[in-house]
Amino acid sequence: MHQYKRSSELFTEANKYIPGGVNSPVRAFKSVGGTPVFIKKAKGSILTDVDGNEYIDYISSWGPMILGHAYPKVIDAIKAKVEDSTSFGAPTELEIEIAKLIVDMVPNINKVRMVNSGTEACMSAIRVARGYTGRNKFIKFEGCYHGHADSFLIKAGSGASTFGVPNSPGVTPGTANDTLTAKYNNIEDVKQLAAENKGEIAAVIVEAIAGNMGCVLPKKGFLEDLRELCDKEGILLIFDEVMSGFRLGKGGAQEYFGVKADLVTFGKVIGGGMPVGAYAGPDEIMKVVSPVGPVYQAGTLSGNPIAMIAGLTLLKELNENPHYFTELADKTEYLHKGLDKVLSESGFAYKINRCGSMISVFFTDIDVIDFETAATANNDKFPKFFHEMLKRGIYLPPSSFESYFLSNSLTYEMLDKTIQAAKDSLEAMK
């Protein structure tokens, strides 16, 4: 049985100085109850907490640790680069190298602008779309989370859903008026909004694979229909690939689904775990960005050399070893089949969604295709399952509205241990 004495002490202390004791809401375990685990170190797919407990990790720092924690080549590159200073606030050659590599790997883009987070990337992409089209409104989807910028916190997913505040206080009615919300996987909703706001919509932003209401896949034809509608109405299609970028494959969701986006946002993986984001697109659109064009966006630490060397090293590994994506997909499929077996034997209602190395277990008997159906799985079974798994050394996302992210450092032995832990956890829940 794991002991959490030090984690409990730290959480009590953290609450004195940090809102809710955490610097990002989902970490507080509000959705599952109990005391959050404070992590001390990680290697590969093993997390070690401050009490010395070890866990098999299925969060991967919410995506970027695609080859595992403390990946040797990335760590060595950071150590070497940090000797030159942690920041300059001036251009470096590294920024060119990583931008060129991203352009080489991802379809339909010529220019990349580095920022410091996924939130910043998505916020900037919307601004660029507005500047390029001369329109103010945009469409997002219920349950898709694009960061915490004001205009995105209208029926958002992830932490906002976990805490029941999809319309966050502090967001003005004026901001909300420019944000149009549709149901994910419902093209008729989008068509209706486009008709009702003819000539006013700058962009549609979508998680090509939703990861903030659990892993939810686009229905066959949904992304293609979005592309067709956007072309017809002069609307820019933005793929938020903060989670899916460089995880589904070298070219992300555009390559995976064969659907072209006008702008793409990235995060996580391109910093190798460091705080990084980026938005990218073709010359025709990106030329509106300052200092070339009139759309202003800046960041003092954008292109930070430590983040750039970490991201460049990791992206090179992925680019030169595409078999990693196949291996990851195979491991995720293996986990899927194992979980499917033990869940089917348990008698609990469940659905499993999977795409590439993203996967979610939903305790519901309804197919999960959007936020409304994902919400049916936000029940008392998930917190019980989470804590039973945690006791058995398996670290899952502490919310039913979050996808699991696998890393290639997971061994089949670890996957077998996870499947056995699930079997034992489900038995303990009866």
Image (spheres, grey):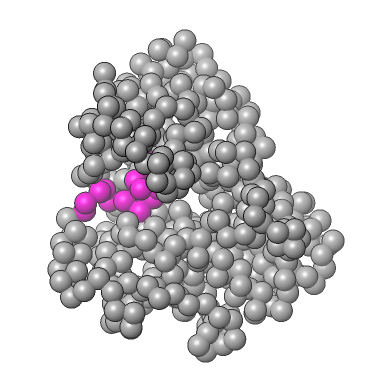
Q: Nearer the viewer, residue 189 or 149?
A: 149
Q: Which residues are magenta?
A: 58-71
Instruction: Say whether residue 69 is magenta.
Output: yes
Secondary structure mainly formed by the magenta segment: loop
Can I make out residue 312 in this image? no
Q: Going by the picture, which residue comes out furthest to the top? A: 430
Quadrant holding the N terminus: top left
Position of residue 5 measured from the top left corner of the image (x, y, whole percent): 27, 27
Q: Quadrant of residue 127?
A: bottom right
Left or right of residue 377, residue 429 in this image: left
Position of residue 120 measured from the top left corner of the image (x, y, whole percent): 50, 65
Residue visible at 26% across and 68% down in the picture: 306
Position of residue 102 measured from the top left corner of the image (x, y, whole percent): 39, 71
Left or right of residue 252, residue 44 in this image: left
Q: Going by the picture, which residue comes out furthest to the front? A: 16
Instruction: Say whether residue 35 is magenta.
Output: no
Position of residue 368 measured from the top left corner of the image (x, y, whole percent): 60, 35
Q: Nearer the viewer, residue 174 or 285?
A: 174
Can I make out residue 198 in this image? yes
